[in-house]
Amino acid sequence: MTIGTTTPVLHPNDATSKPFLVTLSMDEGKEKYVSKVADTADDSSSSKGKKRFQFLISFCAALVGMQAGITLGWTSPILPYLTSEESFLPKLSESEISWISSLLALGAIAGAVPAGKVADWIGRKWAIILTVVPFTTCWLTLITATNVISVCVARFIGGIGAGAACVLVPVYIGEIAQASIRGALGAFFPLLFSSGILFSYVAGAYCSYVIFNIACCAILLPFVLSAPFMPESPMWLMQQGRQDQAAGVLSILRGSRYNIVEELAVLQDEVTRIAKASGGFKDLVWTKAGRRAAVTCVGLMCFQQLCGVDAMLFYTVHIFQAANSTIDPFLATIIIGLTEVVMTIFVATVIDRFGRKPLLLISGALMTVCLAILGYYFRLKDGGSDVSAFGWVPLTSLAFFNVVFSIGYGSVPFTVISEIFPPETKGVASSMSIVTHWSLVFAVTKLFPTMEHEMGQAATFWTFSCFTAASVAFAYFVVPETKGKTLQEIQKKLERKKVSSVKYPVEPA
């Protein structure tokens, strides 16, 4: 059976040759092309392809994630300065402090909602490049800010870039990656995100306000210089009918000796299927695979935030000051940021070996323990007990919390988003997931000071621990394992119905 298209393909042994036409066939054409490749290329190299360039391109795209992390971690070292006597702002109220922290999340929602559609219109690459505009505007506004309104506006604009980046980068990486390394490549975004948070902690602790914001803006330069060399997503190019460019990009990403004809055939099949779908919210909820994928990703995003991680990131220095920790609050914050970066690197090396589900289970269970211990520490402190001998507990608990958070819920949800949705709904579905993420970032960071004041710190951390315990059950019963599966295999798994093991007697004829 022949697919009714003629697809331009680069010869696998000549990266510089012009595309030639190959009629793709499910039986004859594919066999002829594969046999032709076999005569001129080594089997192992043509089937596996080269992965080095995929790692490089994924790293370049994920540099935008570093900016998102910087904007997220910005408040932790800066809020103590803004509330001090040296600040250029008048004395801030508790409400103003919470707005400075949480407006980033509202901006992220505004950036995430249209990001998927923009990427469908102009391409993944250029949509990612456009995030430079809100990030640059944010830092320039903060550098020249003279009042609290300017700071709030800057935070909102920076959030637009962060929200868009969280949608666009995982989608882009998921579409350029081979299935065997998609998990490792997907970990680049949370890795650079965590690195951005660490940069904020370090630079914010030792630099002046203006120098810190200038440094944050300067971190955009590596991405601006590398962005022109990023290729467009092969999937998006096929959707635009630009098969020759898609073939060229695949040849670059996989290596000149890689057999791209089979992958092109799969992409063409996906394009044909997508053409029959509207690609909107209806396609997402009217299919079993779409509903399961949506529930999985929204649930992962909910539990990622309901553990309170971003409240701790925003108020890390404040938490250590309130705990009367024997360790310098700024140094403790840097240690926590460093542990998150190290563990994200660890996750990148094991996610394709151990799978997504086991990492989520381990992460949820151990986060529950860390938060329960931290809550008990504050219970003793607030009850008047002498906790001076246990001043190391807050740092140990929060550091280990960041370690186990990074193992699972810090990295895996972004990887799952990049691979669990079919191309026709990936834009709207990713936007929906990220909107959920940032809505909860806003809710948690805005309510965290109120929760501490009304409930007490012990009850606040115990509330978070209850949510992390629930995340274990969610990961076990709901999240599908996607390790090593192609995007098409994942969709088939989501559509699959459970077969009953009950055998019914057959009546005699």
Image (cartoon, rainbow, N blue to C red):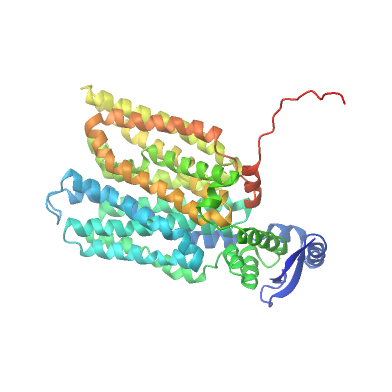
Q: Quadrant of residue 261?
A: bottom right
Residue 278 x/y as whole percent:
56, 58
Q: Quadrant of the N terminus?
A: bottom right
Q: Position of residue 315 (x, y in %)?
A: 28, 43
The quadrant of the rendering that contains the C terminus is top right
User: Which residue ends up furthest to the right in the rendered image?
Assistant: 509
Residue 336 vs residue 501, the one in the foreground: 501
Residue at 58% over, 40% down: 480
Q: Is residue 470 left or right of residue 314?
A: right
Tell me, yes or no, if residue 200 can be seen here.
no
> Horizontally, is 28 left or right of 468 in the view?
right
Residue drawn at the location 36% of the way across and 27% of the way down:
373
Q: Position of residue 360 (x, y in %)?
A: 51, 37
Q: Is residue 386 left or right of residue 483?
A: left
Task: Kindly tell me whether residue 272 is visible in this rendering.
Answer: yes
Q: Position of residue 297 (x, y in %)?
A: 50, 44
Q: Is residue 159 left or right of residue 285?
A: left
Residue in the picture at 48% in, 71% down: 228
How many numbered markers are drawn?
0
